[in-house]
Amino acid sequence: MKKKRVGILISGRGSNMSSLIEASKASDYPAEIVVVISNRPDAEGLRIAARHGIKNIALDHRAYKSREDFEKDLHQALIDTDVELVCNAGFMRLLTAGFVEKWHNRQLNIHPSLLPSFKGLHTHQRVLDEGVKITGCTVHLVRTDMDSGPIIAQAAVHVEPDDNADSLALRVLQAEHKLYPLALALVASGKVVVKNEKAVICSQNGPSRSDEQHILYAPSLSPE
Ligand code: GAR
């Protein structure tokens, strides 16, 4: 099996990046992480990537005159490493239509809510403010609008009565760490097809039941 070459874009601590790196170490995982790029030179994730022996690049967006100039170097860095798929993992920079188009259906993002609800920042506080009972996380293909695009996979997480934004963020993050490797595996193994702007999961012989079952993590109603 030829593994798909993946570049990860980060801005901070890189825990989702770490979960993808760990998953990619399995010999039967269909993707390998070949480069990690951060728009913030002080991102902890860059140091983690270095410890794993993965090529890591800091592209400080503040050093560029325009978004387009920054994205030109970002794109070139991905091309220079023969990247086939891009994973945004806590990459907190809006991308222009020009960049998004270049990676159409080849760029994934993870967001800590059940999209299309609660796009943007301060997700968990807004979830709590609305009294939502079930939240979660979503991996989707990137489109120009922030946190939008065909949904590949989602995981559901209970909101507990005594949750605050930090406790909820932590539980959602644990779900993110399971979901992102699964979603990337689906895309890297060619099981995701986009039809009418919806991601459909299928295998060579038609939709695979076991793949579908992996997609939703239903919250347990009783304590574990
Ligand atoms: C994650 O919770 C991710 O879902 C979120 O940023 C965090 C990054 O954490 N991304 C977004 O909000 C994108 N809209 P990490 O650096 O530890 O992976």
Image: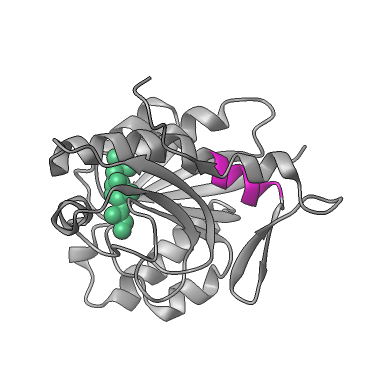
**Residue 67 versus residue 13: which sits nearer the camera?**
13
Residue 9 drawn above or below residue 100? above
Residue depicted at x 42% and y 27%: 52
Residue depicted at x 21% and y 50%: 124
Residue 128 drawn above or below residue 196? above
Q: Residue furthest top?
A: 224
Picture coordinates of residue 186 (x, y %)?
64, 47
Which quadrant of the figure has residue 65?
bottom left
Q: Main secondary structure of the magenta part?
A: helix
Residue 89 is one of the magenta-drawn residues = no
Picture coordinates of residue 173 (x, y %)?
32, 38
Residue 185 is one of the magenta-drawn residues = yes
Residue depicted at x 18% and y 65%: 62
Q: Quadrant of the C terminus?
A: top left
Which quadrant of the figure has residue 24?
top right
Q: Quadrant of the N terminus?
A: top right
What segment carries the magenta color?
A: 182-189
**Residue 111 versus residue 207: which sits nearer the camera?**
207
**Residue 60 versus residue 88: which sits nearer the camera?**
88
Picture coordinates of residue 116 (x, y %)?
39, 66
**Residue 209 versus residue 166: which sits nearer the camera?**
209
Picture coordinates of residue 12 (x, y %)?
24, 45
Q: In this orientation, does residue 82 appear? A: yes
Residue 48 drawn above or below residue 73? above
Please state if 11 lies on the left or on the right of 34 as rendered: left
